[in-house]
């Protein structure tokens, strides 16, 4: 059985569907055929039983037979019985008394004698039996009464041959068998055709998946009817959505690599030039003036810092969603902004940074959220005029950072959160163009929104809205030992 199941499971789906349909139809046809055969058999036997009852009701049949069985047997052709009809009388003991016109003698069974033993008038018993030659017959046994000569019970037995009935049933069984076979074969063919038609979209999907695996072409799409809502259509739409997402992800990845290569080229070229100048000075023995040497070393240090910041930004952008989700927790936005403010004041010591912060808790990754706030403050510090002022406010989950710098042109506002995008006026300043992109991504992952716009009176205002989270319970104090 296990081997059969393994063989079945190894078959293609269309073959399994065809087998299941054929098996179901075969079971249904077999049940109908057997039921039909037994119904027809019952009807034919009822007809034979009706003929036997009519024979028993014919005038003179019973009286003539009793006269022969109690007196000297003689032929009697006035009872109207056919030559193929069996007529005989049985008693509790002794051999049956057979009508001379009967074609043979019906074998008597204990059930037949039981009719006599029952001693009830008008008791009729039907059965299927055989004569002494082995021919099948349908038998009626009718209790008549008591013989006056020997005081034994007497019963009348009438029988008709079943040769014609059995021939009809055999022919019917053959016809049903042929019809069932044709039905099963037709059902198997129909099941195979239906399976092929139903699985044609699956075949297309399989071919598409194999082609994607072979060619790595993510632009392949499976055509799906707009109003189709079956499982195959849903699977096809899911596949198309998956390949679209993968294609977009690959495109973004390639764009990120191209942009990163372009951004890395500039600091690396400058760094290589400065190092070559320092190396050539050492090799030729021509010392560089001290002021120029300090400027070169400062430039090398600045380029190294820019490279480290760019690499850190790229690492942040390359982290997967799962890595972020594992570190998400309830964070105090007030504490995060205060930590970012301390770093911003170090980078702009000549600036005045005014802060008004209210408590607020949100769900986010602490390090990523602090980095996003630091990036916003860095932009404000970078574009603020000397001895300028930066205003920071946190109220009801809304963080605003305003500077009094030159502001952002209206045509550049739609691009400020794009990766590696930098305003033409800011390309001479340090930075990778990834800071605001990281801000937007971090805030969106926390379920918030970030916008950048013009401030009243000049400058730029950055607004971050973050959803609230339940205040975490205070930590239990450490036990004193």
Image: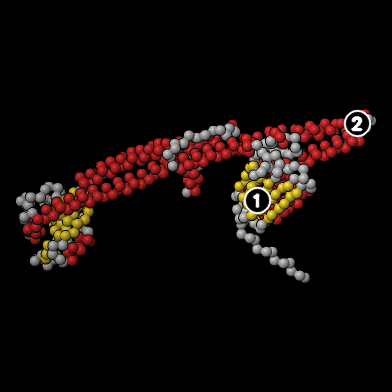
Relative placement, left or right, of 7 versus 351 is left
Helix, strand or loop under label 1:
strand
Judging by the rendered image, the residue that carries numbered circle 1 is 399
Judging by the rendered image, the residue that carries numbered circle 2 is 281
- Tell which of 338 and 135 is nearer to you: 338
Image quarter for residue 193?
top left
Q: Residue 321, position in %: x, y?
A: 63, 46
The residue drawn where x is 7% and y is 50% is 80
**Any part of residue 278 in sight:** yes
Count numbered badges in the picture. Answer: 2
Image quarter for residue 252?
top right
- Tell which of 169 and 311 is nearer to you: 311
Q: Residue 101, position in %: x, y?
A: 11, 50
Counting residues from the start of the chain, the first of labels 1 and 2 encountered is 2
Relative placement, left or right, of 49 versus 275 is left
The residue drawn where x is 70% and y is 56% is 335
| The C terminus - image quarter | bottom right
Query: In this rendering, is residue 393 above or below 94?
Result: above
Q: Residues within 10 Å of mark 2 (few under 14, many from 20)?
A: some
Q: Residue 460, position in %: x, y?
A: 67, 43
Q: Residue 180, position in %: x, y?
A: 32, 42
Q: Which mark is residue 194?
A: none
Instruction: State yes or no: discs 1 and 2 in contact (Cβ < 8 Å).
Output: no
- Tell which of 480 and 473 is nearer to you: 473
Q: Nearer the viewer, mark 1 or mark 2?
A: 1
């Amino acid at each position: 059985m296990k081997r059969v199941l393994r063989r079945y499971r190894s078959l293609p789906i269309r073959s399994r569907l065809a087998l299941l349909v054929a098996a179901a139809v075969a079971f249904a046809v077999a049940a109908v055929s057997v039921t039909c055969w037994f119904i027809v058999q019952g009807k034919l036997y009822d007809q034979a039983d009706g003929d036997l009852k009519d024979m028993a009701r014919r005038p003179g049949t019973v009286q003539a037979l009793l006269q022969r069985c109690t007196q000297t047997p003689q032929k009697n052709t006035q009872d109207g019985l056919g030559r193929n009809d069996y007529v005989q009388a049985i008693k509790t003991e002794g051999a049956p008394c057979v009508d001379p016109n009967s074609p043979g003698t019906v074998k008597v069974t204990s059930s037949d004698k039981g009719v006599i033993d029952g001693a009830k008038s008008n008791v009729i018993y039907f059965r299927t039996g055989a004569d002494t030659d082995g021919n099948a017959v349908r038998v009626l046994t009718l209790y008549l009464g008591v013989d006056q000569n020997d005081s034994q019970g007497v019963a009348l037995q009438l029988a008709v041959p079943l040769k014609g009935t059995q021939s009809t049933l055999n022919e019917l069984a053959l016809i049903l068998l042929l019809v069932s076979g044709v039905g099963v074969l037709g059902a198997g063919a129909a099941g195979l055709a239906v399976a092929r038609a139903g699985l044609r979209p699956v075949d297309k999907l399989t071919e598409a998946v194999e082609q994607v695996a072979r060619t790595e072409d993510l632009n392949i799409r499976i055509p799906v009817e707009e109003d189709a809502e079956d499982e195959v259509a849903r699977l096809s739409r899911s596949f198309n959505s998956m390949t679209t997402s993968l294609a977009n992800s690959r495109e973004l990845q390639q764009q990120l690599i191209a942009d990163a290569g372009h951004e890395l080229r500039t600091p690396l070229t400058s760094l290589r030039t400065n190092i070559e100048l320092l190396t050539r000075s050492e090799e030729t023995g021509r010392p560089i003036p001290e002021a120029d040497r300090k400027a070169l070393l400062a430039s090398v240090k600045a380029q190294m810092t820019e490279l480290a910041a760019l690499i850190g930004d790229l690492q942040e952008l390359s982290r997967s969603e799962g890595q972020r989700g594992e570190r998400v927790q309830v964070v105090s936005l007030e504490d995060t902004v205060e930590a970012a403010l301390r770093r911003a004041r170090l980078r702009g010591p000549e600036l005045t940074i005014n802060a008004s912060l209210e408590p607020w808790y949100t769900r986010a990754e602490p390090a990523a959220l602090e980095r996003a706030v630091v990036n916003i403050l860095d932009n404000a510090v970078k574009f603020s005029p000397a001895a300028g002022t930066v205003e920071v406010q946190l109220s009801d989950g809304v963080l605003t950072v305003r500077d009094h710098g030159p502001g952002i042109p209206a045509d550049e506002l739609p691009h400020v959160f794009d990766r590696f995008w930098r305003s033409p006026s800011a390309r001479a300043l340090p930075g990778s163009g990834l800071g605001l992109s990281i801000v937007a991504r971090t805030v969106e992952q926390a379920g918030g929104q970030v916008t950048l716009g013009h401030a009243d009176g000049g400058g730029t205002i950055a607004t971050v809205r973050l959803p609230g989270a339940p205040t975490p319970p205070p930590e239990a104090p450490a036990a004193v030992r």
